[in-house]
Amino acid sequence: MAQVTNTFDSYDAVGIREDLSDIITNISPEETPFYTKCRKTTARNTLVEWQTDSLRSSAANAHLEGDETSFDAVTATVRLNNATQIFKNAVVIADTDEGLDKAGRASEIAYTTLKIAKEQKLDIEKALFDSNAKVNTNGSARELAGVPAWLTSNTDFGANEGADPTGDGTDTRTDETTTLRAFDQDRFDTVMQSIWENGGNPDTVYLSAFQMNKALAFSGNNNQRSNVQAGDERVIKSLAVYVTPWGTVEFLPSRENRSRDVLIIQDDMWEVATLRPTKNIELAKTGDATKRQVVTELTLCAKNEAANGGVFDCTTS
């Protein structure tokens, strides 16, 4: 069909009011499961220290009546530490902007400050999961050692370049580059057994979406996959809890840990020590603009790494 000649339509009109929704849609993920589940404590120094200890292996223990007593060798505790890391984000908004009638928010400075606070929380989660060594050197930005830098007792990794770190946060894992291996049930169960033998009771497995799909292929009646629920015809494909002879763990997909790492965590063996809780601070005005910054300072404490483990150097595609 053709439009009648000289028809005045909406494309010719001047002064049509805009139709702009008053809702701002943001679906970016903001969950921080590990940071949320970690115990919280207060730091009193930029270097947070703690001690770990362990029992000797069991041995035969029988003695004669009246036998002279011999004394056991005493092993000192292990003293560990991690550096607090400063997380800082800031925005500056021209004051003119506060007088404008905007859709979706009453105040630009309030909206953007809340946004960077959420982004900073994601940065913290990423730092906790990073294979990163601590930095505590004068003149350098302090950095905390993430979870992979502590794990040595119960690990499965590549057989070529792959190697555990020292385990005190001073260095990182050595990543396998030659031959990555698929994450599977055998590798996972082996690490779970090792954790149990060392006295650990892990609660949560943090893994990427790709590795979660590998876990869905685990065999066993604990994993009820692709079953149709009678009545509502729902198809269920999930693995919320995995039951093994070595303990029961929850599989929790995480967007911030490295996809090549599957971390098996005993939640109460990790603490986040906060020196400066998250604070929204207004900075001094130096012109016709408002400045605000969000600052958090904290570190990660590995209370006893032997209660945890990891399957490393996994294929990611």
Image: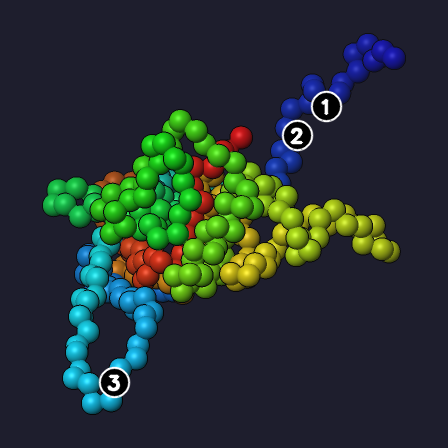
Disc 1 is placed on an element classified as loop
Give the amino acid type for the residue marked by disc 1 in the picture. Answer: Ser
Q: Nearer the viewer, residue 47 or 121?
A: 47
Give me the C-alpha separation between circle 1 and circle 2: 8 Å
Give me the C-alpha separation between circle 2 and circle 3: 103 Å
Q: Which mark is residue 16?
A: 2
Asked if labels 2 and 1 touch by Cβ distance under 8 angstroms, the answer is: yes
Q: Residues within 10 Å of mark 1 (few under 14, many from 20)?
A: few
Q: Earlier in the sequence, mark 2 or mark 3?
A: 2
The nearer-to-camera label among 1 and 3 is: 3
- In the rendered image, residue 124, in percent from the top left (x then y), is placed at 37, 49
- Disc 3: which residue: 64
Q: Specify whether 298 is left or right of 67.
A: right
Q: Specify whether 163 is left or right of 187.
A: left
Residue sticking out furthest to the front = 64
Q: Residues within 10 Å of mark 3 (few under 14, many from 20)?
A: few
Q: Nearer the viewer, residue 222 or 226?
A: 222
Viewport quadrant of the N terminus? top right
Quadrant assignment, res 158 = top left
- In the rendered image, residue 112, in percent from the top left (x then y), is placed at 42, 45
Q: Is residue 170 visible?
A: yes
